[in-house]
Image (cartoon, rainbow, N blue to C red):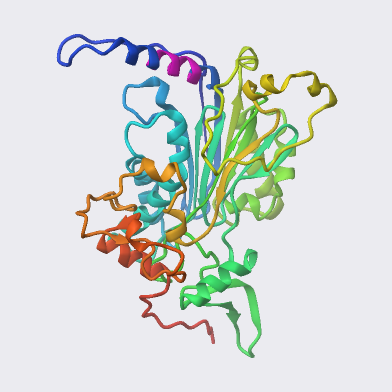
Amino acid sequence: MSSRSGSTGGGSTGGGSSAGGGGAVPLAVLLRREVASERTASERPELHWGLFSQAKKGEDFTFLKPECERVPDVPSSSFSAFGLFDGHNGNGAAIYTKENLLNNILSAVPADLNREDWLAALPRALVAAFVKTDKDFQTKARSSGTTVTFVIIDGLVITVASVGDSRCVLQAEGSIYHLSSDHRFDASKEEVDRVTECGGDVGRLNVVGGAEIGPLRCWPGGLCLSRSIGDQDVGEFIVPVPLVKQVKLSTAGGRLIIASDGVWDVLSPEVAFNCSRELPPVPAAEQIVKTAVQSKGLRDDTTCIVVDIIVEKNNSSMPLAKRQPGIGVFKNMFGKKKSSDSSSHSHSDREYMDPDNVEEIFEDGCALLSRRLDSEYPVRNMFKLFICAICQVELKPNQGISVHEDSSQPGSLRRWDGPFLCQSCQEKKEAMEGKRRSRDSSRNSG
C-alpha cells in the first residue's frame, strides 16, 4: 500500500524581470499582464491532496502535478492536473498514457490564449489528446489497455475528461456531482448499439449448455468497457474519445474524489464522502480505500485520490470580470434555488459576484470526432485551420481531410470547411467508426 500528500497555495504570485536579449516590453502589455495576474490570483484556491492505494495486480497508476504552467515561466498561467489510469491486460497503456497525455493536451491547445480562451479551448484539446495518445500507443503494443480519468483545475474551474469506469465525483454546497460516466456496456445501451453498428460483438459469456453469465463484454477479448486507451486487440470501436465535463465552483470550494473501480464497485459516492468526512485528504483517501477493501476484500487494485479545493475567505468578496458574450456552451445545469435574502442584491451586483452554486460550463460525451472536433464559434476560430486536429502536424491546403468526410448528413455540412485531419489520423477515425474492420469475433468458452 502507498500514500502521498501535498498542497499548493493560492493568493498572489510574484514575477521577475531580465535585461538584455529582447527589446523593451511596451507599458500597455505590462499593465495588461499585471491586471490579468491580479485577477487570476484572486481566483486561485488552495489545494490539498492525498493519495492512497492498495495493489493487487500493480496496474493502477496516478499522475499528481499540482503546479503546472501552460505558458512556461508565467505564474498567472498555472493550473493543477491529477490523473488516474487503471490498466488491464498489462500496465503498458497506463504507463504510456501517464507519461504522455498532459504533453499531448498542451500541444493541442493553441498558443497565446488568455485564460478564458484556454478554458474554452480545453474540451476540444482533451479529445484530440486522448485520441493522439491512443493512436501513438498502438505503435508500441496491441494488447494492453487503460481507463483514464484526468482532472485539470484552473482557479475555480474544474475540467474532467474520462474513458472507462474510474470515476471523479465532486462534493460542494452539500451536494454530490458526477463529473465522469461509466463506459461499461452494462451502463449504456447507446454504447452497445454504437459498437455493434461498428462491427463489434457485444454479449455475455456463453458457458456449456448455452447459459450466459457475467457482464456484457465485447468479443474477442471479453472487455466490458466501451471506451479506453489501448485495447487494439479487441477492436478500434473501443474508442478513446472521452466524456468531458467542465464546471465552476462557488467560493465555498469543494472536495474531489478520483478513484478506480476497486472503490466504486463497492462504495457509492455518498458512502465514500460520508466515511471520510472531516478528514484531511491523505487520511480520507486511506479511509475510502480501506472501507472498500474491508467490504469485499482486495479483489482488484484499489486507488483513491482526494483533492480539497479551499478558497480563502478574503477572496469571496472580490468581484469577477463580467462574462463575455458569444460562447454558446455556457449553461447552468446544477443550479440550486437561492435563499430569499439574495433578492436584496441588485441585478448588476449579481453579474460580478461568484455563483452561489456549482455551474456547469460544458459537457459532451459523443463518440463522433466529426462533432467533438468541430467546435462552435468563437472556440473554433482559436484553432489554426491547416493543422491536423488530432496530431497537430502542419498541413498544406490540399492535404487535409475534413472531419466531415463521409458524414451521414452530407446536405447539412460543408466538408471543405474543416477541421482537417492528416491521412493517418483520418484512417484512425475511419477505424473507430467501423469502416476498417477485419477481425472475427467469438465468445464461446466451451
Q: Which of 293 and 442 is in front in this view?
A: 442
The quadrant in which residue 37 appears is: top left
Q: Give the residue displayed 35% in from the left and 50% down from the top.
A: 96
Relative height, residue 219 to residue 342 (above, below): below
Picture coordinates of residue 363, whole percent (x, y): 57, 48
Residue 35 falls within the magenta-colored stretch? yes
Judge left or right: residue 110 versus residue 122. Answer: left
* Number of numbered tags placed on the structure image: 0
Picture coordinates of residue 58, whole percent (x, y): 46, 51
Residue reaching furthest right?
340
Residue reaching furthest bottom?
209
Q: Nearer the viewer, residue 360 or 177?
A: 360
Q: Assign the magenta stretch its main secondary structure.
A: helix
Q: Give the residue displayed 64% in from the left and 64% down from the top.
A: 187
Q: Give the residue displayed 46% in from the left and 53% down from the top.
A: 59
Residue 1 visible to the viewer: no
Judge left or right: residue 239 versus residue 178. Answer: left
Judge left or right: residue 149 versus residue 360. Answer: left
Relative height, residue 128 to residue 437 (above, below): above
Per the rendered image, the range of residues in magenta is 33-40
Picture coordinates of residue 71, whole percent (x, y): 34, 28
The quadrant in which residue 270 appears is: top right
Judge left or right: residue 140 versus residue 206. Answer: left
Residue 248 falls within the magenta-colored stretch? no
Relative height, residue 297 to residue 324 (above, below): below
Residue reaching furthest left?
21
Picture coordinates of residue 288, whole percent (x, y): 66, 41
Residue 255 visible to the viewer: yes
Q: Nearer the viewer, residue 32 or 254?
A: 32
Quadrant in which the C terminus appears: bottom right
